Amino acid sequence: MIARIAAIAGAALAVGAILAWLAPGRAPASHAYFDAAPEGRAEIIAHGGGQGARPPNTIVALEAALAMGADVLEVDAQLTRDGILILRHDATLDRTTDMSGRIADMDYSEIARADAGANDVAGRDFSGEGIRAPKLSDALAAFPDARWIIEIKPDTEEAARAMCRDIRAAGAATRALVASFHDAAMAAFRRACPEVATSMSSREATRFVLAAYVGLAKFLPLEAVALQIPEESGGLRLVTPRTIGAARRRGVRMQIWTINDPEDMRRLLSLGVDGVMTDRVDLLKDAVDAAKASG
């Protein structure tokens, strides 16, 4: 009896899977943000705004990344006590400046005194060169033609609304793609700024990859136009022909982080990913040029 029930259940699941595979999926995602993306190759995305060359999330890093050939500037944004978004990865100043303290507990006027070149994450010393943690609004204004990926670091609606405010004020609605690991912050941003492109939150990315593995990604409702993931996580390889194909059929751009080894770069480019985030823009530029030349 049990065997018969199991057989019937298995058959029902198989029929359901076949019907699901044959049924039409949802329409592909799209956004004007990608209209300016290079055709025929992966985008070169400068992680931390070019932190392989200069202190991360600083104006000098952004300048260096663009000079080396970055297509997109990826930065992180934290919110100060007085409601200013600044370019910083950590919630504190301790690791990457000569000051300490939680950014959320400080006004921007205090943070502006910090030397953002004093404790560079690459172990180099840029102290005394006047490098500061810039406002997001100032960075957007300094590079008015650049395309951006901007990550909301705090999991708050206040930070999400501040992000919307700064992007709109800069006229960057088609040049910015907003990311966040946090589901709540991402939902708040989408409510505030529905016109701006977003990537998947952690939960959305997990759900998409799992659905791709079983062939059901075409049915997922999507609000994001990009999937930003590492090559593998927890021993599971996330970037495979199956997941890449599922993303492509849904119109979702797959952007992989954070790749600094040339061999890894070449492997991912050969798989056909849409973008690679790196600290080493120079090495990725060489890999992309070589891949393009080889046809």
Image: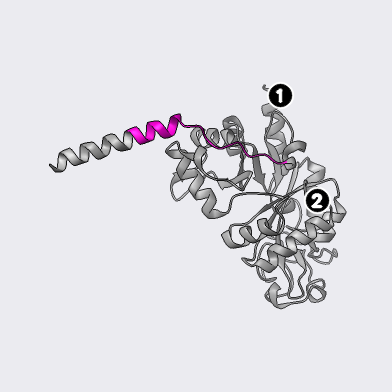
Separation (CA) of disc 1 from disc 2 = 33 Å
State the residue at coordinates (43%, 47%). Answer: 235
Depicted 154 relative to depicted 53: above or below: below
Which residue position holds label 2?
A: 172
Please tell me how crowded label 1 is: few (under 14), some (14-19), or many (20+) other residues with Cα within 10 Å: few
Q: Residue 222, image x and y in percent?
A: 58, 46
Which residue position holds label 1?
A: 293
Magenta stretch, residue numbers: 15-31
State the residue at coordinates (69%, 62%). Answer: 160
- The quadrant of the rendering that contains the N terminus is top left
Q: Amino acid at mark 1?
A: Ala
Specify which label sits upstream in the sequence, 1 or 2. 2
Label 2 residue SS: loop
- Look at the image and name its color scheme: one colour
State the residue at coordinates (57%, 33%). Answer: 249
Q: Toward the viewer: 16 or 114? A: 16
> Which of the labelled discs sits on residue 252, or is there none?
none
